[in-house]
Image (cartoon, grey):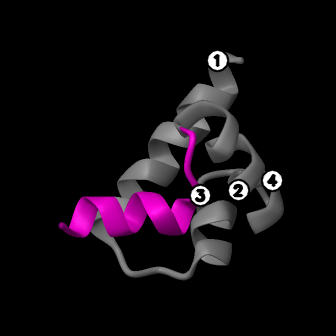
Amino acid sequence: QYLIQQKLQRALILLKETTLPITQVAEQSGFGTSHTLIRQMQTAQGMSPTEYRQSQQS
């Protein structure tokens, strides 16, 4: 659980501060695949990586 939280925090930073594709965000934050990142974000944040990125741009 702790490791997942750390990976999610890294992913959120990358989503907010970069324009990297979701696949690269997943790889660089340690999730491996975008599918895993999407599933974890839906569970923890209630939104997809794309939705999160869009919410941070407003």
The stretch in magenta equals 46-58
Which mark is nearer the camera, 3 or 4?
A: 3
Pointer 4 and pointer 2: residues touching (CB < 8 Å)? yes
Pointer 3 and pointer 4: residues touching (CB < 8 Å)? no
Amino acid carrying mark 4 in the image:
Thr
Residue at x-position 74% and y-position 66% = 34
For mark 2, what is the residue? 38
Pointer 1 and pointer 2: residues touching (CB < 8 Å)? no
For mark 4, what is the residue? 36
The kind of secondary structure the magenta stretch mainly shows is helix
For mark 3, what is the residue? 48
- First in sequence: mark 1 vs mark 2: 1
Q: What is the x, y in percent for residue 9?
A: 46, 39
Residue at x-position 81% and y-position 62% = 35
Q: SS of the residue at dot 1?
A: helix
Which mark is nearer the camera, 1 or 3?
A: 3
Q: Give the spatial CA distance, label 4 vs label 1.
A: 16 Å
From the viewer's perspective, is 12 left or right of 24?
Answer: left
Pointer 2 and pointer 3: residues touching (CB < 8 Å)? yes
From the viewer's perspective, is 56 left or right of 38?
Answer: left
